[in-house]
Image (cartoon, grey):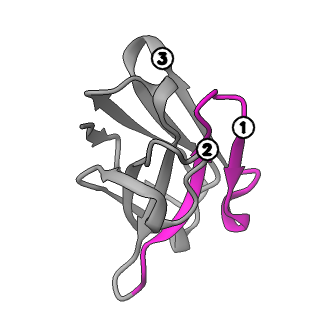
């Protein structure tokens, strides 16, 4: 069992930055991959970023490469998503996700074991 609690969402102007946090309980990060997904109104939930079990492998959706960075703090069992150069099209609810035990990186919803509650990110133009 793992529970995920997100924070850090809010309203920001285009070009600004936000850092999302996801605190995990029940399992240590060494046991599973973590990821971030987002969902805008009327759209399907889509992959944003992931960090592997070892913490050494990261992957990003093309639309956030060079702008977003995923990282984790093992001492706090917390994963972060640093979002820079935000664009209005980044507006969405952002969800933290824990991968299933055998998943190395989590890039599709089918590989997700647990979801956070979501945090709203709104970018004004």
Magenta-drawn stretch contains 51: yes
| Mark before the other along the chain sequence, 1 or 2 | 1
Element assignment for label 2:
loop
For disc 2, the neighbor class at 10 Å (few under 14, some 14 to 19, many from 20) is some
Tell me the CA gap for discs 3 and 1. Answer: 15 Å
Instruction: Give the residue pinned by disc 1.
Output: 57
Residue at the spot of label 3:
74
Q: Nearer the viewer, residue 37 or 103?
A: 103
Give the side of residue 112 with respect to residue 88, left or right: left
Q: Position of residue 24 (x, y in %)?
A: 32, 31
Most foreground residue, 88 or 42: 42
The image quadrant of residue 25 is top left
Labels 3 and 1 touching (C-beta < 8 A): no
Q: Residue at x 42, y 81 (%)?
A: 44
Q: Which residues are magenta?
A: 43-67
The percent position of residue 72, horizontal first and vertical second, equals: 53, 27
Q: Is residue 35 above or below residue 1?
A: below
- Total label count? 3
Direction from residue 27 to residue 56 in the image, left or right: right
The tag on residue 9 is none
């Amino acid at each position: 069992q793992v529970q995920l609690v997100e924070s850090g969402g809010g309203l920001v102007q285009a070009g600004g930055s936000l850092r999302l946090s996801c605190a995990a309980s029940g399992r240590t990060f060494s046991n599973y991959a973590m990821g971030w997904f987002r969902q805008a109104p009327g759209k399907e939930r889509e992959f944003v970023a992931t960090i592997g079990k070892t913490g050494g492998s990261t992957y990003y959706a093309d639309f956030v490469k060079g702008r977003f960075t995923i990282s984790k703090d093992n001492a706090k069992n917390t994963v972060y998503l640093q979002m820079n150069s935000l664009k209005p099209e980044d507006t969405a609810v952002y969800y933290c996700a824990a991968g299933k035990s055998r998943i190395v990186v989590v890039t599709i919803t089918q590989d997700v074991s647990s979801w956070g509650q979501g945090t709203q990110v709104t970018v004004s133009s």
